[in-house]
Amino acid sequence: MSSSTASLPPRTDEASRPSTVARYRAVRAATERLAAPLSPEDCAAQSMPDASPVKWHLAHTTWFFETFVLEAGLPGYRPFAPAFRVLFNSYYNAVGEQHPRPRRGLLTRPSLEEVLAYRHCVDDRLASWLEAGGGGELASVLEVGLHHEQQHQELILTDVAHLLTCHPLRPAYREDLAAPPARPAAPLRWHGLEPGLAWIGHGGPGFHFDNEGPRHRCWIEPFELASRPVTNGEFRAFVEDGGYAEPGCWLSDGWETLRREGWSAPHGWERWEGAWRQSTLGGLRPLDIDAPVCHVSFYEADAYARWAGARLPSEAEWEVAAAAAPVAGNFVESDHLHPVPLASDGARAPAGLFGDVWEWTASPYVAYPGFRPAAGALGEYNGKFMCNQMVLRGGSCATPGDHVRATYRNFFPPAARWQFSGIRLARDVR
């Protein structure tokens, strides 16, 4: 999910107006609950150029509804604060100027209190408008806005996790997170998938982002997919075998990135008195060797796969395997906010395809055959990012469960590793 990416889907009339208002209120309230454990100082800090302050996320998602719904649909609407149009515009050039992303942490004003007042004002005006019969012609835009907000809910958690990892005391986001289950990782098995012509991409009813279509055919060669994601214990073996010091495992750009950034283990791993510990949203914890490894870049995922004598699946292979799987797993609603050992052993089919970790694929993020971005500003949501990024699939422990599906295409630059990104192996059948 790169930092925020979607586009205008076909118009739908699936929900009645009262349920639309209720869902709007529920999604917006969920965002504020994620921010509630944080101090104003926490909400203002920016730990790196790729992350944003929580205060900015709270304001930007509000700016989206104000700009693309209220201003477009409510005659004579007057913005809450005209200056916010620049401060909280992310990358929509068709809308106007933007404050530079790497400098969002310098926006000490407006205050968190003012941003929350902005949210509540827009919420009340939008809900009142919908309840009065407005918004039918903008139902699709409103739906995009809700899924856009869910993307930012995940970004709030991942950006806060990175921020707290930078703190010398490694404080917890929340001390009361649900305890991870103690269970051993199931043995890794391989599941063969038959070759043939397969359909991938979204088709039919239901919300989807424009980059998930058009639905199209692709040829799948025979391959095998691992029954579960790679665990911390398995990745630890790569680390302790000198994987970060062996250039033969790495793509050239990955090796240069490793050397430049000084990587020697996944983001958040630390050695303490001979044992590994990991920074989590629940604070610094002993490394759970049975949980899926996370906070690895595409370069690290690819290097591990080479070391293990395997490879990463293509996004088409992943989607074919996931097409019949239930969308169930460790999502944000589980309240672990970290990957946990899988409950299923994956004996009959690949397990854990949804939740816990976004799984890197070997596929670059490019347009599907026949893709056309939507007209207008919302056409900037997805299409213009189809360069220098890799696709991830499946959702994570920070993703809302009703936000993902088998066709969902997340994407990040190959060096990104502050997300809950992990690894599932594939291999060719000869």
Image (spheres, rainbow, N blue to C red):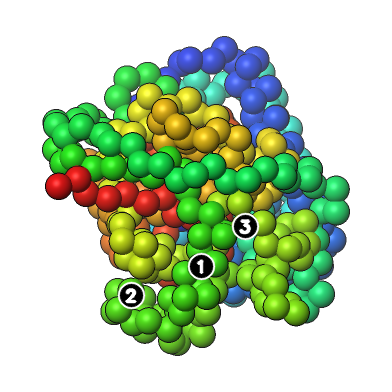
- Position of 180 with respect to 192 (left or right) is right
Residue assigned mark 2: 250
Q: Residue 198: x, y in percent?
A: 19, 30
- Position of 341 with respect to 177 (left or right) is left
The vertical placement of 340 against 310, above or below, is above
Q: Nearer the viewer, mark 3 or mark 2?
A: 3
Q: Residue 374: x, y in percent?
A: 31, 40
Corner quadrant of residue 222: top left
Is residue 258 or residue 188 the one in the foreground? 188
Q: Residue furthest front?
A: 187
The vertical placement of 96 against 6, above or below, is below
SS of the residue at dot 1? helix
Mark 1–mark 3 distance (CA, rounded to whole Å): 10 Å
Q: Residue 89: x, y in percent?
A: 53, 57
- Tag 2: amino acid: Trp
Asked whether the residues under the numbered discs 3 and 2 touch, taking CB atoms below 8 Å apart as contact, a structural biologist would say: no
Q: Give the residue displayed 37% in from the left and 81% down from the top.
A: 246
Is residue 425 or residue 83 the one in the foreground? 425
- Position of 18 with respect to 38 (left or right) is left
Corner quadrant of residue 186: top right
SS of the residue at dot 3? loop
Q: Which mark is residue 289?
A: 3
Is residue 34 or residue 182 the one in the foreground? 182
Circle 1 Cα neighbour tier, 10 Å, few/some/many (<14 / 14–19 / ≥20): few
Q: Which mark is residue 237?
A: 1
Q: Earlier in the sequence, mark 1 or mark 2?
A: 1
- Tag 1: amino acid: Ala
- Tag 3: amino acid: Ile
Q: Nearer the viewer, mark 1 or mark 2?
A: 1
Mark 1–mark 2 distance (CA, rounded to whole Å): 16 Å
